[in-house]
Amino acid sequence: MAKKAMVERQKKRERMVKQYAARRAALKEIAADENRPMEERFKANLKLAQLPRNSSPTRLHNRCQITGRPKAYYRKLKVSRIALRDLASNGQMPGMVKSSW
């Protein structure tokens, strides 16, 4: 089980990314538009830098929905390998069979 503080920090980041997504996209569009004057593009870059760091989507990290584990994460199922094995062993994951050779 991951630290509760880390899971809560991740949730906070997800909320901030969602909150600032439109503002960030608009500023990025202005900064990338080569038809606009250089000063306007520079101001957009400065405003972009003033947004909170945690509002950047690159700061998000995939975590297991069940345990909060940050590593060995299956994107399709949104769980870690350990949680996946537990779910499969309990028969809660349809179509999963324990392999042996």
Image: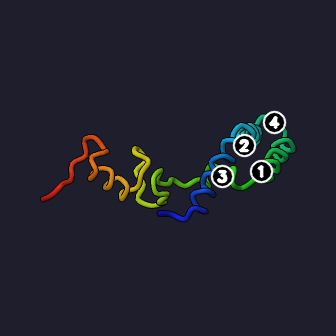
Where residue 83 is drawn, which disc sits there? none
**Element at label 3:** helix
Mark nearer the viewer, 3 or 1: 3
Mark nearer the viewer, 4 or 3: 3
Along the viewing direction, whichever of 58 and 66 lies nearer the viewer: 66
Q: Residue furthest front?
A: 90
* Residue 4 on image: x %, y %: 57, 62
Q: Residue furthest right?
A: 39
Mark nearer the viewer, 3 or 2: 3
Along the viewing direction, whichever of 67 and 55 lies nearer the viewer: 67
Where residue 20 is drawn, which disc sits there? 2
Where residue 51 is drawn, which disc sits there? 1
* Residue 67 on image: x %, y %: 46, 57
Q: CA distance from mark 3 to mark 1?
A: 15 Å
Which mark is first along the chain, 1 or 2?
2
Q: Is 72 left or right of 47, judged from the image as shown?
A: left
Which mark is first along the chain, 3 or 4?
3
Looking at the rendered structure, the kind of residue marked 3 is Lys
Crowding near pointer 2: few (<14 within 10 Å), some, many (20+)?
A: some
Q: Quadrant of residue 18?
A: top right
Where residue 36 is drawn, which disc sits there? 4
Looking at the rendered structure, the kind of residue marked 2 is Tyr
* Residue 60 on image: x %, y %: 59, 53
Q: Which residue in the structure is indicated by mark 3?
A: 12
Which mark is first along the chain, 1 or 3?
3
Q: Quadrant of residue 73?
A: bottom left
